[in-house]
Image (cartoon, rainbow, N blue to C red):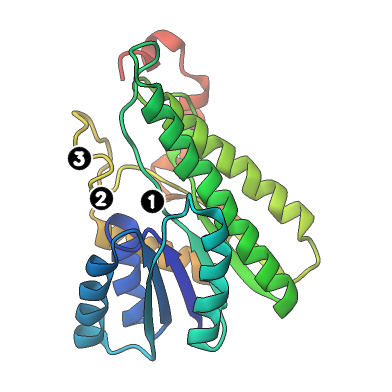
Amino acid sequence: MPSIMITGASSGIGKALAFELAKRGYSLALTARSGDRLEQIRKDIVFIHNPPAVAVRSLDVTDYDDVFKAVNEMARELGGLDIVFANAGIGLGERVGRGDFEKIRRTVQVNLMGAMATVDAAAAYFLEKGKGHIVGTSSVAAFRGMPRNSAYSASKAGFAVYLETVRVELLRKNIHVTVLYPGYIDTPLNQMLKRRPFLISPEKGAGIIAQLIEKKVKSSTVPVYPWNIVGRLMKMAPASLVARM
């Protein structure tokens, strides 16, 4: 069965996907800033699903040099990686012109620069290996700048465009690139929001993501419906409507 490295695996989508793929027999390399939390997740996964292997490692994706080390270390520990899922991200609810620029800087540093470092490290590894699959978490917030989420929307849109560029650069290199645009999945990232339309559980989201990864889709919303339609409408909505969201 395949092996996958997941960043941001200590909570939310990353954690739920780790359990889902363990159930499917994948070998797992899990990273996040909290090593203690990862170790408990490892124990729970082994107890419930007993996958072929579960490796864990503390990683802050803003330590860009360590990102490259982590990919290579996880590959050695599992005897190779087939998939790298750049999933680590934050949402701090920053507001423009309100003295929140530190939140803006941190959001871009993690969601864009950290994610790009993860993908670049994965691409280097897969180019040497001769094949692989890169998966990245963008967001439906990438379709339209959302109030109180300026840096989050910008970082996710930037990461999506970056992944599209990576796909072009790696064309005919036997490396697949998948861009995922999750809607509202019930995770700590969005639980402070008043409105979360079409909300789904992390477990349901993980099941959908697992299927999309296994199909090697180029891009998809999560869930596919209704966000594949709503996403198009968001791009066309007048600013006055978006401001009330």
Check if mark 1's residue and mark 2's residue have beta carbons within 8 Å: yes
Q: Which mark is residue 191?
A: 3
Residue 220 % position (x, y): 51, 51
Separation of marks 2 and 3 at Cα, in angstroms: 12 Å
| Residue 182 on image: x %, y % | 40, 47
The residue under label 1 is 223
* Residue positioned 43% across, 66% down in the render: 6
Q: Quadrant of residue 45?
A: bottom left
Lower position in the chain sequence, tag 3 or tag 1 = 3
How far apart are the two marked residues, 1 and 2, measured between alpha carbons?
8 Å
**Helix, strand or loop for disc 1:** loop
Classed neighbour count for the residue bearing mark 2: other residues with Cα under 10 Å, few (<14), some (14–19), many (≥20): some
Give amino acid for label 3.
Gln
Residue highlighted by disc 2? 200
SS of the residue at dot 2? loop
Instruction: Give the residue displayed 39% in from the left and 8% down from the top.
Output: 240
Q: Nearer the viewer, residue 87 or 146?
A: 87
* 165 to 108, vertically: above or below: below
Identify the mark nearer the N-term, 1 or 2: 2
